[in-house]
Amino acid sequence: MAEAEILNLPQRNLLGRVKTFINAELVHILAAILFLLLAIFLLYPIVAVLIKSIKGPEGWTLAYYLKFFVKGYYFRSLINTLLLGVINTVVCLIVGFCMAYLSTRGPMALRKPLKLLTLLPLIAPPYLFAISLIILFGRNGVLTNALGLNWSIYGFSGVVIAQTLAFIPLAYLMIENTLMSLNPNLEESAYDLGASEIKIIRTITIPLLAPGILKAGLLVFVMTIAEFGNAAILGGRTPFLAPDTYQMIIGEADFEMGSVLSVILIIPCIVIFFLHNYLLTGKKFTTIGGKPVASEPRKITPLVKVPFFIISGIAALVITVSFGVVLVASFTQLLGVKNEIVLSHILNFDSNRAIYNSIKVSLIAAFIGAIIGILLSYVIVRGKFFGRSFIEMVSLSGFALPGTVIGIGYLLAFNTPPIKLTGGIMILALNCVFRFLAVGVEAGISKLHQINIEIEEASADLGANFMTTFYKIVLPIMFPAFIAGFIYTFMTAIVSLSAVVFLVSPGYELAAVKIFDAAAYGEIGFASATTMKLVLIVILCMIGLNFLSKRSRFQATQKGVSKNV
């Protein structure tokens, strides 16, 4: 018996040393695992696209790039794409600023309705506006026939209008968030010293909003040139890079040329990203101080209020009309041509199956993405190892790269062993996870900066291991960041098109792809009905998620109170 105990002692000591090592190095182990996931599901697909663009059947070559720069069609496509991105970014920033200013500085009665109308496009596919513009201004459109218009919505101008309406909410969110944190006493002091409101906006408000405005511009530019739904439906014969890439991959199965177009699409995004960082490097934009701030809302002068109200009112009206038109078209045989009321579009079971698939994929992606986002933010903030900044940059890169490129990368990287995912639902979910991971990571980092590390150190001093500290202390405090990552990923994934359109397979069709195909083939009624059903499902899911998050927070608070008592 004594001999057995002696033999077991080394095993116990070894097991104890292993547990001690794991507990001490768990952050580093976790960081290695997370970086491996980022390398496989984010870096590897991008590298696959780059390799495919310079490797043909006969080996390494730059012939495909030469073809791009020699052929005039591709050059026009590049110019149109860049011009679309610049115009959309400028217009979205102007409109977004006007709407954000009114919803934070304007009349109280106007603020909430204006915010709700501005954010309405976030719960619908971006190309809802392409559908509504076709119904209103198409060749047999309602307004085209009623007013006898000769202007065609198809072409560059139609794409600009649709893309602008789709991405105004992104610019608004970034600018409104920064405006809300701006110390109002700065503007009040300038006003008391006799400065006009226009001068205050020009010399104080806008300069302090520079980080928000630049981030909004970066995001809108990337999303505009990458989202091909509106461009493919309304572009007509006007070439754009994203639809051309889709045509190369899906239509002609030319993966080499499609990869070249994808790489060209990445370049302006990278340039804009480094320009954004250069403009903000070495500058401070302090908008939140440590002292409490109290100020009474002051009236906006008519010289500012009137133009801001006109711009915001037109944008809100067009957004509302677009949703209304699509809703009416859902119950009409063909709005503007055959106005008979029908239910066949709404009751179509093909769309219901696609919506169910979208909900399933979005929930899986949201759950996995929120967990990975929280863990990544923890190792980035609390870890002490070389390469933390690189891990953070990689985790955010999915957000800064066009979805079209990531979709093609997944198709190239995971179509053959050793990691064959195509043809199933997980490739769709993982694509959404790593594309939209940035929001969960940023939310987690922001929350962790508010948690004093002494709380975790005190827990460790009292004998708790890393897992106990993380589970009982860190995780409950970071729950809002988890919910933020979950909700954003769910909302974005369920209406996303630019990446998943390359990855859907028979039996796993998604609602966004179903709507795009129907709109492209002129089935406007079916496309409208599926869009509105998707919007309704998103609203119901958001209400449910919001209720669950509030209930969870309430229960966590109650537990904390009972423990303290």
Image (spheres, grey):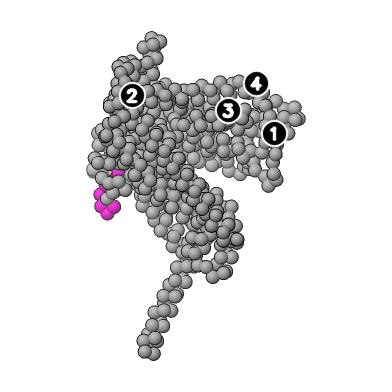
* Kind of residue at disc 3: Leu
Of residue 333 and residue 314, the one placed in the foreground of this image is 333
Which of the marked residues, 4 or 2, is nearer the chain's N terminus? 4
SS at badge 1: loop
Q: Which residue is mark 1?
A: 296
* Kind of residue at disc 1: Glu
Which of the marked residues, 2 or 3, is nearer the chain's N terminus? 3
Q: Dot 2: few (<14), some (14–19), or many (≥20) neighbours within 10 Å?
A: many
Which of the marked residues, 1 or 2, is nearer the chain's N terminus? 1
**Disc 4 versus disc 2: distance between alpha carbons?**
42 Å
User: Where does the image place residue 370, in percent across and percent down from the top left?
Assistant: 44, 49
Q: Which residue is mark 4?
A: 302
CB contact under 8 Å: marks 3 and 1: no
The magenta stretch spans residue 416: yes
Which of the marked residues, 3 or 4, is nearer the chain's N terminus? 3
The residue positioned 63% from the left and 23% from the top of the image is: 304
Q: Dot 4: few (<14), some (14–19), or many (≥20) neighbours within 10 Å?
A: few
